[in-house]
Amino acid sequence: MERIERDFFARDKEDQQAFLTQTWCNQCMEADLGMVEPSEYEVNGVVFVEGKCARCGEPIVTEIADDSTDGDWDDGE
Ligand SMILES: [Zn+2]
């Protein structure tokens, strides 16, 4: 699959803040522990933000439902 790098820091400060604080860590099994070293990329039209859990350092990947990306071909039925 093709992975397209995106610029996480091009987002609004508020957006960045939300992604960095509203997290779920599978390792800690706890929400909102925070995330460090964020990076953003796109695979198959789906955007992901990836970083590390601020507590345990395990990778966290957040999928972003982004309506503004191209490819609205599956709207409706
Ligand atoms: Zn963790």
Image (cartoon, grey):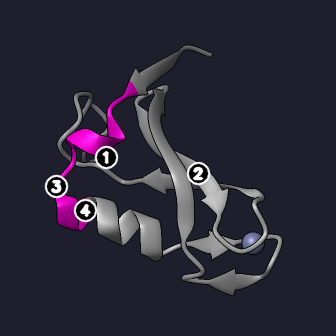
Check contact, mark 2 vs mark 4: CB within 8 A.
no
**Pair 3/1: label in front:** 3
Indicate the secondary structure of the residue bearing disc 1: loop
Disc 2 packing (10 Å; few <14; some 14–19; many ≥20): many
Check contact, mark 3 vs mark 4: CB within 8 A.
yes
Give the CA distance from mark 1 to mark 2: 35 Å
Q: Is residue 24 left or right of residue 75?
A: right
Q: Is residue 23 left or right of residue 76?
A: right
First in sequence, mark 2 or 3: give its number.
3
Q: Is mark 4 within 8 Å of ligand 1?
A: no
Label 1, on which residue?
77
> Magenta region, mostly helix, strand or loop?
helix
Indicate the secondary structure of the residue bearing disc 4: helix
Whether residue 42 is situated above or below residue 76 in the rendered picture: above
Dot 3 amino acid type: Asp
Tell me the magenta residue range. 6-15
Instruction: Give the label on residue 51, or none.
Output: 2
Whether residue 62 is situated above or below residue 55 in the rendered picture: above
First in sequence, mark 1 or 2: give its number.
2
Dot 4 amino acid type: Asp
Give the CA distance from mark 3 to mark 1: 33 Å
Q: Residue at x 34, y 42 (%)?
A: 8
Label 3, on which residue?
12
Q: Residue at x 60, y 80 (%)?
A: 33
Label 4, on which residue?
15
Dot 1 amino acid type: Glu
